[in-house]
Image (tube, helix red, strand yellow):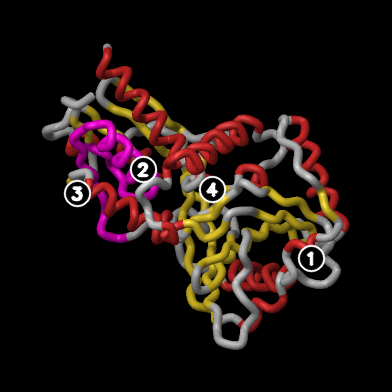
Amino acid sequence: MSEQSLAVIGGGVIGLAVARRAAQAGLSVRVHRAAQRGASWVAGGMLTPHSEGWPGEEQLLRIGLESLRLWHGGFLDGLPDDVVTARESLVIAVDRADVADLRTVAAWLADQGHPVSLTTAARDIEPLLAQGIRHGFLAADELAVDNRKLVEALENDCEKLDVRWAGPVERVEDARYGVETVVIANGIDAPSLWPGLQVRPVKGEVLRLRWRRGCVPVPQRVVRARVHGRPVYLVPRADGVVIGATQYERGRDTAPSVTGVRELLDDACVVMPALGEYELAECAAGLRPMTPDNMPIVGRLDERTLVATGLGRSGFLLAPWTAERIAAELLVGAQA
């Protein structure tokens, strides 16, 4: 592998994770990235395969758990400690229908060999929850990261490993100059480089609330809920909370909508009423690269081209798994 050279198209969390892993393995790496930040800059940064799981997504659960083990097993080595903002998740239900969904997920996880313990004392675990919220389960090994700090930390690590930066490209051939292999890792734009990839943009709005003097403290764990059937999550940050995320198809529209923002605020305050005193610091929307079956597209396209896209809502969670898959493909190619 030491003689190999690689161009990675895409400077989000997936492209950076792939570039970092390849450089660690001794490859000469160049990353083609745009000046503007993409979906990785908007994300919540949750690493939560248990609490995001849903019946029918058994394979996604499996690779999510595999990737979570990689997060715990060394992916964070060399990165700043404050990249991690939470070390467990609490999944809660608000009304009777939400309790039924909670029990469905818990039973499904148990059937997959990953049982969780249901509780009827959720406020004992997270006192900031609204009165009347009792049902939930705790996922003790899940994590959350500050997405922006992580992206910057990966960029810094790549620079320490002599990864080179270059501008965006419009064709795969434009990235081939001076390298043996190209990895397409530019999210929703991947089909423009390789027609036929089944990836589409799915919009998701995210809010950032900032703690203010006199407000209740920032929660210490990820809180996920269903509020009248709508999913909402609250993710701690050093200075506040990230709230997300809506999910609907609007092409490439990244303008936050009044309806989306209102629903997120309403649902978040139903779960944790004291958040209403925080500062509304940012409203943003990103475009998740989704596939028809919600499974990522990671692997080889031809002898000189690999792809890492379609990670959907699990881009941060699956970054280590994706990087290892691409590295394995490169190693096989080097040994052939």
Q: Is residue 291 magenta?
A: no
* Front label number (2 vs 4): 2
Residue 45 x/y as whole percent: 50, 55
Residue 80 x/y as whole percent: 38, 57
Instruction: Tell me which residue sits at (60%, 48%) in the image.
Output: 142
Q: Earlier in the sequence, mark 2 or mark 4?
A: 2
- The amino acid beneath tag 1 is Arg
* Front label number (1 vs 4): 1
Q: Secondary structure at mark 4?
A: helix
- The amino acid beneath tag 4 is Arg
Marker disc for residue 123? 1
Q: Are marks 2 and 3 in contact (CB under 8 Å)?
A: no
Residue 42 x/y as whole percent: 45, 60
Instruction: Tell me which residue sits at (42%, 31%) in the image.
Output: 298
Estimate the spatial distance between the alpha carbons at disc 3 and disc 4, rounded to whole Å. 26 Å
Q: In what quadrant of the picture does the C terminus appear? A: top left
Instruction: Tell me which residue sits at (62%, 83%) in the image.
Output: 215
Q: Which residues are magenta?
A: 7-36
Residue 313 showing in the rendered view: yes
Instruction: Tell me which residue sits at (33%, 33%) in the image.
Output: 194
Estimate the spatial distance between the alpha carbons at disc 1 and disc 2, rounded to whole Å. 37 Å
